[in-house]
Image (spheres, rainbow, N blue to C red):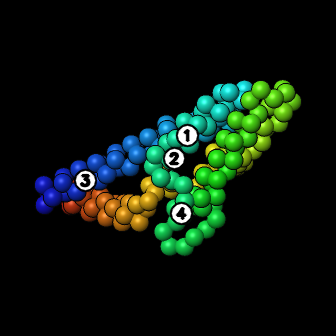
C-alpha cells in the first residue's frame, strides 16, 4: 500500500506539472503577446505582438469551435474571438502610415477588443480553457482521475502513518 500511495502521488505531481507547463506555454505564446499588443504605444509594436499571438493561434488551429464540453456558450466561442483578432490585425495594418490621431484611435479600439474589465483590474479577452482545446474533455477526465488518485494517495499515506 505504501508503494501504491507513492505511485498515485507521483502521478498526481506529474499531471499537475504537465497542466501547469501547458498553461505557461499558452500564456507565453498567446495571452502574453495579446497583453503586450493591448499595451503597445505604437501601431507597429501592437501589430508585431498581435501577429505573434495570431500565428500561435493558427499553428494550433484555434480558429473555430467552442472550448466548452457540454454546451456551447458564447464566452467560449473560439471563432468569434479569432475573427476579432484577425479584424484587429487588419485594422492595425491599414493604420500604418496614417495620421497620429487615427493610429491612437486604432490602438484604443485594440485595447478595448483585447481586454475586459474584471473585479481585480483588467484581463485579456480569451475563451476560457483555450489552452486545452481541442482536447478539453480528455483533460477534464484526466484531471478528475488524477485528483482522485491524489486523494487516495493522501488517505493511504495518512493510514500508513497511523494518523487517520
Residue hosting label 2: 57
**Is 35 positioned to the left or the right of 136 in the image?**
right
Q: Is residue 27 visible?
A: no
Among numbered discs 1 and 3, the one appearing first in the sequence: 3
Q: Do the numbered discs 4 and 2 sit on residues whose CB atoms are within 8 Å?
A: no
Q: Do the numbered discs 2 and 1 sit on residues whose CB atoms are within 8 Å?
A: yes
Residue drawn at x 61%, y 37% is 50
Q: Nearer the viewer, mark 1 or mark 3?
A: 1
**Picture quadrant of residue 47:** top right
Among numbered discs 4 and 2, the one appearing first in the sequence: 2
For residue 11, the mark is: 3
Q: Do the numbered discs 1 and 3 sit on residues whose CB atoms are within 8 Å?
A: no
Cα separation between marks 4 and 3: 31 Å
Residue drawn at x 44%, y 55% is 132
Q: Residues within 10 Å of mark 3 (few under 14, many from 20)?
A: some
Cα separation between marks 1 and 3: 32 Å
**Is 66 positioned to the left or the right of 139 in the image?**
right
Q: Residues within 10 Å of mark 1 (few under 14, many from 20)?
A: many
Among numbered discs 3 and 2, the one appearing first in the sequence: 3
Amino acid at each position: 500500500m505504501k508503494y501504491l500511495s507513492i505511485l498515485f502521488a507521483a502521478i498526481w505531481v506529474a499531471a499537475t506539472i504537465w497542466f501547469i507547463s501547458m498553461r505557461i506555454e499558452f500564456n507565453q505564446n498567446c495571452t502574453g503577446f495579446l497583453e503586450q499588443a493591448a499595451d503597445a504605444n505604437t501601431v507597429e509594436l501592437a501589430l508585431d505582438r498581435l501577429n505573434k499571438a495570431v500565428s500561435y493561434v493558427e499553428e494550433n488551429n484555434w480558429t473555430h469551435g467552442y472550448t466548452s464540453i457540454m454546451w456551447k456558450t458564447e464566452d467560449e466561442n473560439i471563432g468569434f474571438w479569432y475573427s476579432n483578432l484577425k479584424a484587429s490585425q487588419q485594422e492595425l495594418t491599414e493604420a500604418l502610415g496614417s495620421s497620429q490621431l487615427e493610429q491612437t484611435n486604432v490602438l484604443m479600439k485594440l485595447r478595448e477588443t483585447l481586454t475586459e474589465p474584471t473585479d481585480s483590474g483588467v484581463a485579456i479577452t480569451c475563451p476560457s480553457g483555450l489552452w486545452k482545446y481541442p482536447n478539453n474533455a480528455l483533460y477534464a477526465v484526466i484531471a478528475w482521475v488524477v485528483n482522485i488518485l491524489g486523494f487516495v494517495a493522501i488517505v493511504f499515506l495518512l493510514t500508513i502513518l497511523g494518523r487517520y
